[in-house]
């Protein structure tokens, strides 16, 4: 009993310290440069990789969710996304663009375990450097700095476009949708996993939801969250989707990851020795955001959306025409 009381007291003390640091070091979203800088910093200090492994995204805990190793849940997420997206039967050397690849965890699984030829892109130069360090020469995955809102690839370059939890960082969601579909070959598959908010056209944000949403956006360099319904509409509005976008909600499958992320700091005390007091305080600073994320996803303010679309069969000329029209629209808007 005394041991339990001591543990609870220590947990409360750590939460208070984390909250104090959180309040004393406010963050606000500024621009895409702040996204790149944030990921450069998180990559360089190594704390996020130490606790989250090679996959800077949530895990899949099954349906219904069950207890699972934190790192294994992230591997399982990739395999579940492959299955849900209908990519299992694609042949080796299928070309895949991983948009927002992080340090390449998903790209390496797609290359090693499915035989795909993967190109990973991120806006963070340090993530590219680390992804290259972690990727053996015999794995068919390459990485480069690129902007998801202005991809450097020609039209119809890839058989599959894949993205996990990159959308919240995009200030122009319509452009994000357009660019991913533009570089997809006719008949190719787009599979996206993202953090989304509830559709506020149906139920507007009220009371406590507004300040919580503001913190979720500011803390981790997010200009805005789309709703599942809204982003599906933006994909279809490009005119590049055959039939309709398929969506589903993986909130329950991924929900345990938020508390599990905090738990890693308790069950892996070597982090304190590895990163010292400064690293320990930096880690504590993120705990309030994890708790707010768990609150938002658990209460229905946020949802974990899955999106699948097939690129309509059309000529390169029509793709270029649509892209030019979108570019002209953006120039006029700006």
Image: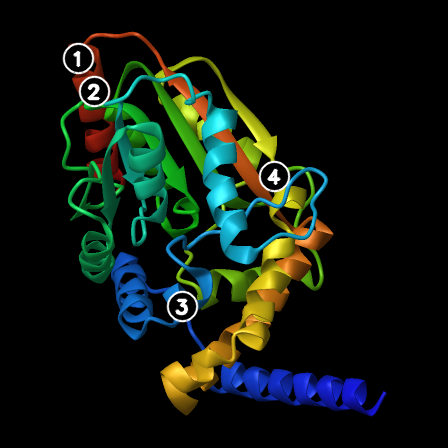
Say whether disc 1 or disc 3 marks the residue closer to the N-terminus: 3
Q: CA distance from mark 1 to mark 3?
A: 44 Å
Q: CA distance from mark 3 to mark 2?
A: 37 Å
Quadrant where the image shows the N terminus: bottom right
Task: List the residue tagged with mark 3.
Answer: 50
Query: Does residue 199 show up?
Result: no
Q: CA distance from mark 2 to mark 1?
A: 7 Å
Q: Residues within 10 Å of mark 4 (few under 14, many from 20)?
A: some
Q: Which mark is residue 156?
A: 2
Mark 3 and mark 1 in contact (Cβ < 8 Å)?
no
Locate residue 94, reporting x and y percent: 26, 22
Q: Residues within 10 Å of mark 1 (few under 14, many from 20)?
A: some
Q: Residue at x 52, y 26 (%)?
A: 84
Say whether disc 4 or disc 1 marks the residue closer to the N-terminus: 4
The part of the image, by quadrant, that contains residue 331 is top left
Task: List the residue tagged with mark 1.
Answer: 316
**Label 4 vs label 2, nearer the camera:** 4
Mark 2 and mark 4 in contact (Cβ < 8 Å)?
no
Q: Residues within 10 Å of mark 2 (few under 14, many from 20)?
A: many
């Amino acid at each position: 009993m005394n041991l339990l009381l001591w543990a609870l007291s220590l947990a409360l003390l750590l939460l208070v310290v984390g909250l104090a640091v959180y309040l004393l070091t406010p963050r606000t979203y500024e621009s895409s440069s702040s996204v790149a800088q944030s990921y450069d910093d998180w990559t360089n200090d190594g704390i996020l990789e130490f606790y989250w492994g090679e996959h800077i995204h949530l895990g899949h805990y099954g349906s219904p969710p069950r207890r699972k190793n934190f790192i294994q849940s992230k591997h399982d997420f990739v395999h579940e996304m492959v299955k849900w997206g209908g990519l299992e039967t694609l042949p080796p050397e299928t070309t895949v663009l991983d948009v927002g690849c992080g340090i390449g965890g998903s790209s390496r699984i797609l290359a090693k375990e499915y035989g795909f030829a993967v190109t990973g892109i991120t806006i963070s130069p340090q993530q590219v450097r680390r992804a290259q360090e972690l990727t053996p020469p015999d794995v068919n995955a390459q990485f480069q700095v690129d902007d998801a809102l202005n991809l450097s690839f020609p039209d119809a370059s890839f058989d599959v476009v894949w993205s996990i939890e990159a959308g919240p960082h995009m200030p122009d969601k319509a452009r994000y949708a357009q660019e991913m579909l533009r570089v997809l070959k006719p008949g190719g598959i787009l599979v996206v996993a993202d953090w989304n908010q509830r559709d506020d056209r149906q139920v507007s944000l009220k009371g406590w939801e507004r300040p919580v949403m503001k913190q979720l956006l500011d803390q981790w360099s997010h200009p805005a969250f789309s709703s599942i319904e809204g982003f599906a509409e933006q994909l279809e509005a490009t005119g590049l989707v055959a039939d309709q976008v398929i969506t589903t909600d993986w909130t329950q499958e991924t929900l345990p990851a938020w508390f599990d992320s905090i738990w890693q700091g308790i069950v892996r005390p070597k982090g304190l020795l590895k990163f010292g007091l400064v690293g320990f305080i930096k880690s504590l600073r993120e705990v309030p955001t994890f708790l707010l994320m768990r609150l938002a996803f658990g209460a229905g303010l946020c949802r974990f959306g899955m999106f699948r679309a097939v690129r309509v069969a059309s000529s390169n000329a029509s793709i270029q025409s649509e892209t030019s029209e979108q570019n002209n629209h953006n120039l006029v808007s700006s």
